[in-house]
Amino acid sequence: MKKYQSGFTLIEALVGLVLFAMIGGALLQGLSTGYRSLAISQEHTQAAALATSQIESIKSERFSRFGDYVVIDVPDGYAIDISVDDAHICRDCQSVTGGPPRACPCGGVYVRQGAGVSGFMLQYIEVCIRHGGKSVIIITSLRTGLAFE
């Protein structure tokens, strides 16, 4: 055997191969995470655009005392749920909520804002965008209108 033989030994080649596999695996995992984040970001952007469009569509429609507003067209895989309720305003801190009256976090009491003497009422509108069966985003809005139209 020659004393000054060139080339790699089997151990050096295996160490190089293991290092290459570790670096390649980390790189692939980073790319996978990046693509997953991009998909989630696109889903949230699409859902926010749909929810905003639905709220604007509701605002452009004639006021409906019973909240029977038209649902906009959505891409495949997406669904829109609209919940309309009379708004409730806290007597103490003036925060607004929908749904059944309950205690306010400030300790005050929510009061239902149905049609008053003027005939105007305040609606609490909640738009939920679902994709693939799971809720992606929920946007709430308030709307006023004549209750006796």
Image (cartoon, rainbow, N blue to C red):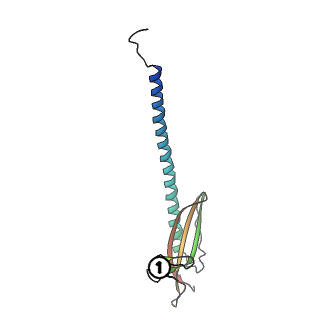
Q: Point out the residue furthest to the front here.
A: 107
Q: Note whether 149 is above or below 20 in the view shown.
A: below
Q: Note whether 97 is above or below 53 in the view shown.
A: below
- Quadrant occupied by the C terminus: bottom right
Q: Residue at x 45, y 27 (%)?
A: 16
Which residue is nearer to you in this view: 31 or 91?
91
State the SS at label 1.
loop
Which residue is nearer to you in this view: 147 or 15?
15
Give the image location of residue 47, x and y in percent. Answer: 52, 61
The type of residue carrying mark 1 is: Gly
Tell me the residue that label 1 is attached to.
Answer: 107
Q: Residue at x 52, y 70 (%)?
A: 55
Q: Point out the residue furthest to the left here.
A: 4
The picture quadrant where one finds residue 8 is: top left
Give the image location of residue 37, x and y in percent. Answer: 49, 51
Which residue is nearer to you in this view: 73 or 95?
95
Q: Note whether 31 is above or below 12 in the view shown.
A: below
